[in-house]
């Protein structure tokens, strides 16, 4: 496996916390501790514009499939809704008063899930943008959300070290998975839905069976917090991003380490914590506290 840095996007003046690929090919959105949400051209490797100003840091960006909407979750607890057809913010979801850390959707139910530091996940109608339910998940922060491929299960990672699996039919809890010794920062289901991968502040990656909820494997993956887990859309690999400034690519069948992208390994990689990843085909995009977006071409 080979990795080559093909581009670096600069322009943010503060740490970048999150990124999201547009449904429109060749467009990337980023947000962080800056005064606005930024749109980039991946075709030209350049800044396009600040989409809209924000009153607080952006911790989550989400573009649900099939909707002309972009959701930005803020440190203030507000969620801004940008409509691409109207080219403006049309709604402000004001329910939480503590930071929003993740946003996902359940497509078959047309529902949006918003995770907050207040320990709850709010459920919204994607059609009307009305609040439908609030799920009390934890007495502490809910950091991340993962929906399985068949959309009958949703998992929430929490600051109290647990990850909790819920039934999406009625949002009833099914199982709390206990094993991490620090906050769970990252979650993703495998594309075949067989297992769930969690990453934590304890630097461990854990693989959980999606049917029995037993721990399949524990990987001492990084030196510091695992900030994000991202499965390749079509190949049997997943990538992890860490506060230790490295990206690691893992075999999704045997859970073996296949590639380390870091300064120590001679790559022109990030110099501070890597916060989020996104696969764009065989390309991996990474954002960091070092204020840059890096593009990596991965050859398998």
Image (cartoon, rainbow, N blue to C red):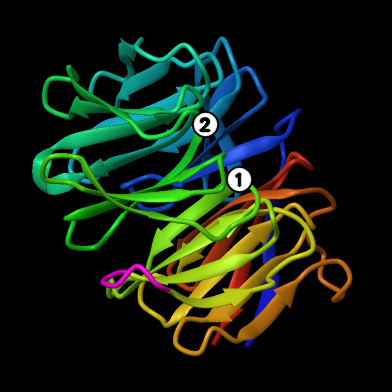
Name which quarter of the figure residue 134 lies in.
Answer: top left
Tag 1, which secondary structure?
loop
Residue 266: give x, y in percent of width and height.
87, 74
Q: Name the residue beneath numbered marker 1.
A: 183
Q: Residue at x 72, y 41 (%)?
A: 10
Residue at x 70% of width, y 60% of height: 203
Q: Which residue is mark 2?
A: 141
The residue closer to the viewer here, 148 or 118, is: 118
Q: State which region is magenta.
A: 210-214
294, 134: nearer the viewer: 134
Secondary structure category for the residue under label 2:
loop
> In the visual, does 240 lie left or right of 264?
left
Vertical order, 98 against 114 (above or below)? above
Tell whether 103 sits left or right of 249.
left
Residue 148 location (% of width, % of height):
27, 59
- For this rendering, which residue is in front, 266 or 137? 137
Q: For the residues labelled 1 and 2, say whether their Cβ atoms are less than 8 Å apart.
A: yes
Can the viewer see residue 140 in this picture? yes
For residue 105, side relative to residue 33 (left or right): left
């Amino acid at each position: 496996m080979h990795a080559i840095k093909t581009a670096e996007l600069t322009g943010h003046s503060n740490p970048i916390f999150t990124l999201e690929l547009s449904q429109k090919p060749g467009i990337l959105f980023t947000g962080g501790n800056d005064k606005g949400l930024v749109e980039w051209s991946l075709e030209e490797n350049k800044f396009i514009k600040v989409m809209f100003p924000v009153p607080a840091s952006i911790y989550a960006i989400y573009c649900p499939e099939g909707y002309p909407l972009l959701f930005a979750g803020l440190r203030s607890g507000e969620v801004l809704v940008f409509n691409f057809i109207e080219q403006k913010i049309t709604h402000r979801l004001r329910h939480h008063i503590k930071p929003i850390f993740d946003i996902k959707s359940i497509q078959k139910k047309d529902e949006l899930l918003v995770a907050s530091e207040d320990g709850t996940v709010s459920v919204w109608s994607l059609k009307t943008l009305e609040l439908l339910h609030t799920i009390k998940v934890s007495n502490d922060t809910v950091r991340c959300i993962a929906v399985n491929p068949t959309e009958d299960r949703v998992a929430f990672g929490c600051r109290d070290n647990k990850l909790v699996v819920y039934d999406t039919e009625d949002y009833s809890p099914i199982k709390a998975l206990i094993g991490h010794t620090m906050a769970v920062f990252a979650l993703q289901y495998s594309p075949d839905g067989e297992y769930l991968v969690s990453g934590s502040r304890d630097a461990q990656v854990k693989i959980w069976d999606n049917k029995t909820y037993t721990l399949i494997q524990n990987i001492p993956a990084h030196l510091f917090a695992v900030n994000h887990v991202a499965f390749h859309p079509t190949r049997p690999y997943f990538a992890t991003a860490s506060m230790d400034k490295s990206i690691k690519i893992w075999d999704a069948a045997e859970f073996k380490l296949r590639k380390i992208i870091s300064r120590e390994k001679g790559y022109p990689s990030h110099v501070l914590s890597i916060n989020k990843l996104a696969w764009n085909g065989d390309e991996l995009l990474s954002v960091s506290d070092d204020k840059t977006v890096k593009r990596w071409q991965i050859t398998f």
